[in-house]
Image: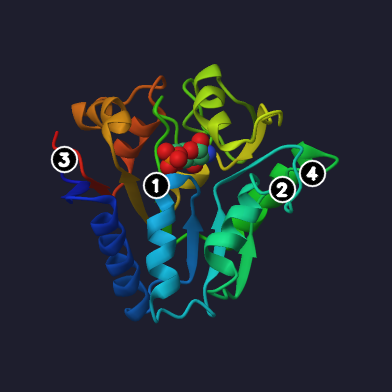
Amino acid sequence: MKNIQTIVVDSKEQGAEKICGLVREELEAGRLHVLGLATGSTMEPVYEKLRASDLDFTNVTAFNLDEYVGIPATHENSYAYYMNHHLFSEKPFKETHIENGMAEDLDAECVRYETLLKENPLDIQFLGIGENGHIAFNEPGTSPDSVTHVVELTESTIAVNSQYFKEGETMPVTALTMGISSIMQAKKLIVAAFGEKKRAALEKLFAGEVSTEWPVTYLLDHQDVVVITDLKL
Ligand code: GLP
């Protein structure tokens, strides 16, 4: 697929190294001003490498893909907490943005976020993939025209992500997420997918047919996608 460059690595640590290399290239070429970040276990080694690197993000604005509704930034399962913990506490950025899942008016919050994104076009967007093929929290069935919106999570996502919540804690079933169109506007997409659980989603992508049921396949319509994976497909 001419628009998708695939880099096969032996481990997620090696994958993280590659991603840092791509970021370095863009940063040093003066092409990285706005960086879209993702969360999840896939991204942890990436942030570990970025933290340990000499890369300087003080002129870079960051936007995160998504956030749970109803848990504050101090909650250890919020994506705001994740980002502070894994990256921002050690790597200062010019500005960082994430949807406010505690906003009283969630629709207004989505409009605010999408407006900010339009004012700060993404140079690079990191993406992980959900086992059901979601990107950010764009679940199967999401329209390609979607912008930042409120989403009810699917049973599959709740089952996968609930492992990160402590026993007795209730996992939010609602989230705010950049839409497919918000993501597709990024100049470059860097997709990381490690481990067998991501095989089905990557197979759908490489099958080359866009399907609403597998949101990851929307990436087929983007001009500059790099997929980093340890899967041999
Ligand atoms: C969550 C996030 C996604 C992320 C996905 C994969 O659902 N909203 O943005 O890509 O999980 O997570 P993991 O990397 O833990 O497999």
How would you rate the neighbour count of disc 4 (Cα within 10 Å): few for under 14, some for 14-19, many for 20 or more?
Answer: some
Residue highlighted by disc 2: 75
The three-letter amino acid code for the residue at tag 2 is His
How would you rate the neighbour count of disc 3 (Cα within 10 Å): few for under 14, some for 14-19, many for 20 or more?
Answer: few
Camera-side residue: 208 or 168?
168
Number of the label disc, if any, that sits on residue 3: none
Q: Hey, which quadrant is residue 98 in on the image?
A: bottom right
Q: Is 152 placed above or below 227 here? A: above
In the rendered structure, are the residues bearing label 1 and label 3 in contact, judged by CB atoms less than 8 Å apart?
no
Distance Cα–Cα, label 4 vs label 2: 12 Å
SS under mark 1? helix
Q: Position of residue 17 (x, y in %)?
A: 28, 64
- Identify the residue at the far front of this view: 167
Residue highlighted by disc 3: 1
The first of marks 3 and 4 along the sequence is 3
The first of marks 1 and 4 along the sequence is 1
Q: Hey, which quadrant is residue 25 in on the image?
A: bottom left
The three-letter amino acid code for the residue at tag 3 is Met
Which quadrant does the C terminus fall into? Answer: top left
Distance Cα–Cα, label 3 vs label 4: 41 Å
Number of the label disc, if any, that sits on residue 42: 1
SS under mark 2? loop
The first of marks 1 and 2 along the sequence is 1
Distance Cα–Cα, label 1 vs label 2: 20 Å
Which quadrant does the N terminus fall into? Answer: top left
Distance Cα–Cα, label 1 vs label 3: 24 Å
Residue highlighted by disc 4: 102
Distance Cα–Cα, label 3 vs label 2: 41 Å
Camera-side residue: 204 or 51?
51
The first of marks 3 and 2 along the sequence is 3
In the rendered structure, are the residues bearing label 1 and label 2 in contact, judged by CB atoms less than 8 Å apart?
no
The first of marks 4 and 2 along the sequence is 2
